[in-house]
Structures are given as structure tokens and as C-alpha cells.
Image (tube, coloured by chain):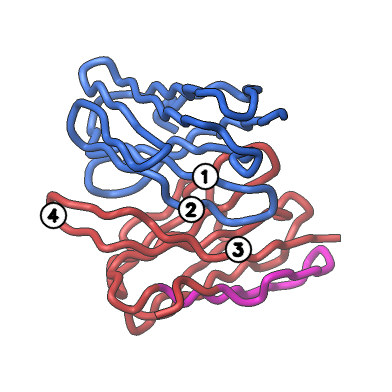
Amino acid sequence: GQNIDQPTEMTATEGAIVQINCTYQTSGFNGLFWYQQHAGEAPTFLSYNVLDGLEEKGRFSSFLSRSKGYSYLLLKELQMKDSASYLCAVYYNFNKFYFGSGTKLNVKP
Amino acid sequence: DTGVSQDPRHKITKRGQNVTFRCDPISEHNRLYWYRQTLGQGPEFLTYFQNEAQLEKSRLLSDRFSAERPKGSFSTLEIQRTEQGDSAMYLCASSLAGTGFVHEQYFGPGTRLTVT
């Protein structure tokens, strides 16, 4: 729902930086969340944007442009344990969350 | 509080049987969501509660699915006459939300349903 699009899969090298993009429909937008999900486990919260700009939390940063319907998650100093799926979730109409299909990130040594 | 819990963690059932799952949210959270997730997909919204009121149910959800949150605390999700297409991970999440604000959702470990 709500045309939340993110790349299906990405590969990056340990120690590098990777950017995962997410686009969404802007009507009714209230906030955008990023979650990490390891295989077979539940999603865990990473970051949250409600206003335009960059939010930084350690090695993870998330950016939002509400006018463009665009966000990205930036992961720095990649570690092997960062291999997981990253889910973009948008909160609409102070009501419910729609999730993208997730981006599977493969970190190689 | 130890977070969101779900029971059972795994359920194998035969086609046509009924199953019920339980979710215990974080105690101070007023919102509780149920999602279904299949391999390679993100969580798909099923329904949500604010306190004990069920405020929305996905149009994708057939009449075989029902959910309750009788006292605004734990919730149950029942699937009647299960079909093989119901095989999935069923996730519960809770959050604190209200008019004009929302906080992040915390997910339970999920219940993996296999219908044979």
C-alpha cells in the first residue's frame, strides 16, 4: 500500500558506507520509520523522521524530504552483523503504518 | 517490562482447523497492531486497536480472521478454517500514539504458522 518503494537487494563491503533509498506517496504523511530485520527475527527500530533533514544515531543516519516523498538510511563503517533486511515504514493519517518490501543488505568481507 | 511477547512461537496445523494467537504488548502502550509477513516481503497490515477498540481492519482480511483486545491489554488473533495460503509469520507490535503524535512500534518475536 501507499507505493512505498525501496531496492530489493544491495551489496557492500565491510567498513564502507551504504545508502538505502525509500520513496512513498506524500498524501497523509505523518512520519517515516526505518527498521532492521535479521532473517527469522522481528523488526527492530532504527530511526524516525517527521521533519525534513538528517537524523543521526551513531553509525546510522536517516534523511527525509517530505516534498519529494523521499528518505534514505545511511549506514557507515559497515560491519558483518549489519547484513539484514532494512524496512522503510510510513505512518499515514495518524492511523497506521505501511511497510516497503525491504532491502536485503549483504555485507562482504 | 520485557517487551512485546507472542504465544505460540510456532504453530503447525492442518487445513481447515482453527488457530488462535496471543499478543501481550508493552503495558503502557495504547496501540496494538497485527501484521502478516511472508518471505521476502515487508509486514502487511491486518488490523489495529487503540485501547480495546478495533479501529481498522484491512480489506485484504477475510471473514475467517478475527481479533480482539477485550480489556485493552493483551490481544488475540483467530483464524478459522485455515488455508495453506495463511502460512506466514504473524507479527504483533505495540506503540504509544494519539492525536498528532506517534512513537515507534515495538514488535514481538512473531508466531510462525504453517498450514499443511
Between the C-alphas of marks 3 and 2, the distance is 12 Å
Q: Residue at x 80, y 60 (%)?
A: B115
Label placed on residue B110 = 3
Query: What range is drawn magenta here?
Result: B6-25
Q: Is residue B116 above or below residue B7?
A: above
Q: Are marks 4 and 2 in contact (CB under 8 Å)?
A: no
Chain B shown in which color?
red
Number of on-image labels: 4
List the residue tagged with mark 4: B99
Q: Residue at x 23, y 33 (%)?
A: A28
List the residue tagged with mark 1: A36
Could you tell me which secondary element the residue under label 3 belongs to? loop
Q: Which chain is blue?
A: A
Between the C-alphas of marks 4 and 1, the distance is 27 Å
Chain containing mark 2: A
Labels 4, 2: front one: 2
List the residue tagged with mark 2: A44
Could you tell me which secondary element the residue under label 1 belongs to? strand
Q: Nearer the viewer, residue A5 or A76?
A: A76
Q: Main secondary structure of the magenta part?
A: strand
Quadrant in which the C terminus of chain A appears: top right
Residue A41 in picture, x, y percent from top left: 63, 56
Residue B108 in picture, x, y percent from top left: 52, 65
Report if residue B17 lies within the magenta region: yes
Quadrant in which the N terminus of chain A appears: top left
Q: Amino acid at mark 3?
A: Gly
Q: Are marks 3 and 1 in contact (CB under 8 Å)?
A: no
Q: Nearer the viewer, residue A14 or A103?
A: A14
